[in-house]
Image: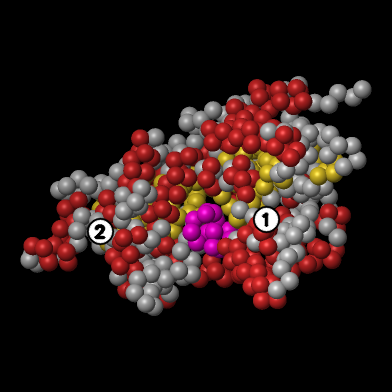
């Protein structure tokens, strides 16, 4: 029968992890989760209560109040790009912060449809664009384009933060690229709805125009240049509202479709627009199934994942706490043991899962020898390449669970042609059209990070955890490489001169410290090397959302019914026949 059998996996937390390790892991991870929650609140607060009060004095809602009023009652908001620019200051000393780069981007359910919301934070310099604000907006637009889900713009933008315009205005993906993304979304039939709530100057004025529907409140205006600039250039006594308010753009220029009295009415209108769109296809693609909770508590992953990146664990136990019913149909389990591939359901929908196995595994050709996990060898590379291609052919979204140290190296690796096998995998993942989602569980190192659909290979979203370490290699390893001419075969310093030994030790420590600092997940999120940091206890819910979004829209990608999957052929052709 053409059917992938989903079988129960996993064991009780007491069996999966020794009690002392479980307690240690949980204690450290909960500490990291508290830091994550505190930092999220810090970003969400924008510039603080004083600026929130200013917004309210104008009779307007803050950006987060607008999002909370827009979303379906009882639903959660799933931000992306929370920590862009986190901890940085801009402008003259002492400079100003730009929490979240002054814009909120999030997955928000509206009228039972997932949307991408892009909303200027009006408590941060009146919604100005900072360095990386355009890139953050464009990344959210890119996610919507890949999934063909509606985009809602909540515009309240006073233009560029001028002291930093040189880092925002020019460049291939600077502010102007937002408008190209507007155009590509429109050309690919992705609904775009814009609400203009206040300032909408220069680039902020262009951003809503290509949208299918544009609403303006009575306080809103859209202008190429604000009144202050025009007064200086033409000595005219005018206001921005008089030259670009709803009187002009709704009734004269036709740059907006409808005027509404206030924020609440505008949000109601946007909800009406969403309700008029085709309904979600998620129920259709469940094929009669429903979302079901794992047999094991999802928050047990907080204790299962060792904080120490050198400690191994069973990734199948993690998968068992992410998938519906803790069910998993492993494919090609007899080969490439350092990789786990298979089919599961999340939110009642089929997904392919590709994960690094950290355990020590028998060497496939050298009897009695073992190989460490978390590394890509020939068999594992070929396995995940074939599985990735089959999922792409079948239209099954792929979740990559990364915990990788890189590719195998050495004489055997070169003789086996790992460069070629790796290139085949990279080609596969570069040309796949199925939605792919990447989770960096712990280590994301070297070319292995690339090969397993790291950020440079355009996953819809890349998620990090509070313990993710993203870098070419570990700090100690890199320090050894940097000072290798001063070390013996056991990596001990060769010099007998106390002064030189001290200098080398200090140099190696400095390199290791700098690289370790660079591997911090908040640094990666700050510079958009990852999209969002998510706690292990939150990961299943986040994956449910992105998987639902992958199936929400119809007609833009192939989705085979399960009877005719290529994955079946793959399983049959590689199955082990008992002798």
Q: Can residue 51 be found in the magenta stretch?
A: no
> At 44% from the left edge and 44% from the top edge, which residue is drawn?
142
- What range of the chain is rendered magenta? 520-534
Residue 171 in the image: above or below residue 433: below
On residue 201, the disc is 2
* Residue 364 in sight here: yes
On residue 310, the disc is none
Q: CA distance from mark 2 to mark 1?
A: 42 Å
Give the secondary structure at mark 1: strand
Q: Residues within 10 Å of mark 1 (few under 14, many from 20)?
A: many
Question: Which residue bears the numbered disc 1?
Answer: 442
Quarter of the image where the N terminus is located: top right
Give the secondary structure at mark 2: loop
> At 52% from the left edge and 38% from the top edge, which residue is drawn?
552
Task: State left or right for residue 519 relative to residue 15.
Answer: left
Q: Choose top left, top right, bottom left or bottom right for residue 410.
A: top right
Q: Nearer the viewer, mark 2 or mark 1?
A: 1
Q: Can residue 530 be found in the magenta stretch?
A: yes
């Amino acid at each position: 029968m053409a059917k992938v059998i989903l079988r129960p996996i996993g064991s009780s937390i007491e069996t999966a992890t020794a009690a002392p390790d479980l307690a240690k892991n949980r204690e450290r991870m909960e500490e990291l989760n508290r830091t994550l929650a505190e930092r999220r609140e810090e970003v969400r607060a924008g510039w603080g209560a004083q600026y929130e009060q200013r917004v309210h004095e104008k009779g307007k809602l803050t950006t987060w109040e607008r999002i909370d009023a827009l979303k379906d009652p009882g639903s959660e908001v799933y931000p992306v790009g929370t920590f862009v620019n986190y901890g940085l200051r801009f402008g003259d000393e002492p400079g100003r912060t730009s929490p979240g780069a002054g814009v909120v981007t999030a997955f928000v359910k509206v009228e039972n449809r997932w949307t991408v919301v892009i909303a200027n934070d009006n408590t941060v310099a009146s919604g100005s664009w900072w360095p990386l604000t355009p890139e953050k907006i464009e990344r959210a637009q890119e996610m919507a384009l890949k999934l063909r889900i509606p985009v809602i713009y909540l515009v309240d933008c006073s233009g560029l933060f001028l002291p930093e315009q040189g880092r925002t205005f020019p460049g291939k993906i600077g502010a102007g690229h937002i408008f190209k993304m507007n155009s590509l979304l429109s050309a690919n039939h992705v609904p775009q709805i814009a609400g203009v709530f206040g300032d909408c100057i220069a680039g902020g004025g262009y951003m809503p125009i290509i949208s299918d529907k544009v609403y303006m409140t009575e306080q809103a205006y859209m202008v190429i240049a604000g009144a202050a600039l025009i007064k200086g250039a033409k000595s005219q006594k005018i206001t921005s509202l008089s030259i670009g308010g709803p009187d002009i753009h709704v009734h004269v220029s036709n740059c907006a479709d409808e005027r509404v009295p206030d924020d609440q009415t505008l949000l109601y209108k946007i909800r009406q627009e969403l309700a008029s769109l085709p309904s979600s296809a998620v129920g259709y693609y469940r094929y009669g199934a429903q979302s079901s909770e794992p047999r094991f508590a999802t928050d047990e992953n907080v204790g299962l994942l060792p904080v120490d990146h050198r400690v191994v664990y069973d990734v199948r136990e993690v998968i068992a706490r992410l998938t519906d019913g803790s069910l998993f149909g492993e494919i090609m389990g007899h080969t490439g043991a350092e990789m786990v591939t298979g089919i599961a359901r999340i939110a009642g929908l089929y997904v392919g899962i590709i994960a690094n196995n950290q355990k020590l595994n028998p060497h496939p050709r050298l009897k009695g020898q073992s190989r460490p996990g978390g590394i890509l060898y020939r068999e594992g590379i070929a396995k995940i390449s074939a599985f990735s291609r089959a999922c792409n052919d079948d239209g099954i979204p792929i979740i990559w669970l990364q915990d990788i140290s890189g590719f195998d190296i050495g004489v055997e690796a070169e003789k086996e042609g790992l460069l070629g096998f790796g290139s085949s995998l990279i080609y596969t993942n570069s040309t796949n059209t199925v939605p792919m989602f990447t989770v960096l569980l712990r280590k994301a190192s070297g070319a292995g990070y690339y090969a397993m659909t790291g950020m440079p290979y355009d996953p819809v979203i890349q998620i990090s955890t509070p313990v993710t370490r993203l870098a070419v290699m570990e700090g100690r390893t890199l320090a050894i490489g940097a000072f290798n001419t001063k070390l013996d075969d056991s990596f001990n310093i060769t010099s007998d001169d106390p002064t030189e030994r001290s200098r080398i030790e200090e140099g190696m420590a400095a390199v290791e410290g700098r690289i370790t600092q660079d591997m911090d997940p908040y640094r990666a999120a700050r510079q958009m090397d990852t999209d969002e940091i998510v706690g292990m206890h939150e990961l299943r819910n986040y994956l449910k959302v992105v998987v639902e979004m992958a199936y929400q829209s119809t007609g833009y990608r192939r989705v085979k019914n399960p009877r005719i999957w290529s994955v079946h052929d793959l399983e049959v052709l590689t199955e082990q026949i008992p002798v």
